[in-house]
């Protein structure tokens, strides 16, 4: 009897796993498409940056604000927090999930504020988007990235609140997709920072 | 189609008449646009075949 019961449980588990995999597929295709579009957006801006920097004689390198490199640490720590939250959700520890998830979101918000501080620093040094091409490109590239981060933060907050209120069948898919996109944004920021330090 | 090709020739001639350093910068910019898009295309083709 006990054997019959466990076989049934395994069958149900396999069915749920298959259902989850089928449901996750379009979600992951969506994630990959979004990542591809984001990559091309930044590739286009990088291409313009490289050509503008190389072809004109009026290019003066910037003194890069420290929040640029500091942002890497903020984003990596927020990713770690989100990953901890994801694991906590998977092992059904909801309070731990809420703590880590919203901790990660808070770090993301600090990142946005840090970048705004960095832009202020550049403005206070007397550089404007109209006056200095290097500053203009820094504003455009980091501004685009911050817009992406704000969008991702909105998604993270929405998902976190939904899960904090109650479980739903698709919650884990949403949570994973959002967390993976956030990790992808980390890599993009690291790329931008390296670009600015190598070719400022 | 002809007028489109004419634009290509114009761009090509302008780019070719630049000095070496400037031509290299243009090449970098073109590669920066080309490499990610080719990688993305290859990735999607792979995904489509893999999931069929």
Image (cartoon, rainbow, N blue to C red):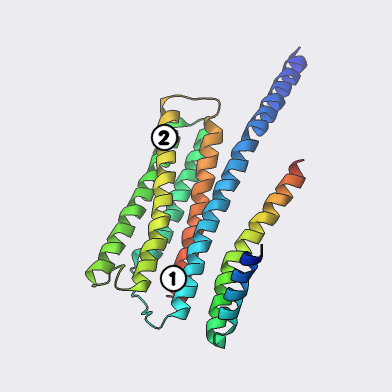
Of residues A193 and A94, the one drawn nearer to the viewer in this rendering: A193
Q: Residue furthest front?
A: B2
Relative horizontal placement of residue A164, taking residue A174 as reference (left or right): left
Residue B47 visible in rendering: yes
Residue A63, x across and y down, in percent:
33, 75
The relative height of residue A73 versus residue A95 in the rendered view (above or below) is below
The residue lying at 51 percent from left, 37 percent from top is: A175
Residue B47, x across and y down, in percent:
71, 47
Residue at numbered disc 2: A158
Q: Chain of mark 1?
A: A
Quarter of the image with the C terminus of chain B is: top right
Residue A64 visible in rendering: no
Q: Chain of mark 2?
A: A
Residue A64, quarter of picture: bottom left
Residue A26, quarter of picture: top right
Along the polypeptide, which appears first: circle 2 or circle 1? 2
């Amino acid at each position: 009897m006990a054997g019959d019961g466990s076989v049934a449980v395994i069958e149900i588990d396999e069915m749920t796993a298959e259902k989850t995999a089928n449901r996750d597929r379009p979600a992951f295709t969506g994630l990959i498409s979004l990542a591809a579009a984001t990559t091309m957006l930044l590739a286009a801006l990088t291409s313009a940056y490289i050509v503008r920097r190389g072809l004109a004689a009026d290019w003066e390198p910037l003194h890069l604000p420290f929040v640029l490199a500091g942002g890497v640490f903020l984003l990596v720590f927020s990713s770690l927090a989100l990953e901890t939250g994801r694991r906590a959700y998977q092992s059904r520890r909801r309070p731990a999930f809420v703590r880590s998830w919203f901790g990660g979101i808070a770090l993301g918000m600090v990142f946005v504020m840090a970048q705004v501080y960095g832009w202020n620093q550049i403005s206070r040094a007397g550089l404007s988007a109209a006056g200095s091409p290097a500053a203009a490109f820094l504003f455009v590239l980091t501004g685009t990235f911050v817009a992406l981060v704000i969008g991702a933060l909105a998604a993270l907050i929405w998902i976190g609140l939904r899960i904090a209120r109650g479980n739903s069948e698709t919650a884990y898919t949403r949570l994973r997709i959002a967390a993976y996109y956030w990790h992808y944004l980390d890599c993009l920021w690291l790329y931008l920072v390296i670009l600015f330090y190598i070719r400022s | 189609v002809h007028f489109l090709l004419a634009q290509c020739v114009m761009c090509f001639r302008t780019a070719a008449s630049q000095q070496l350093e400037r031509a290299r910068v243009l090449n970098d910019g073109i590669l920066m646009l080309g490499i990610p898009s080719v990688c993305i295309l290859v990735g999607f083709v792979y995904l489509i075949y893999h999931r069929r």
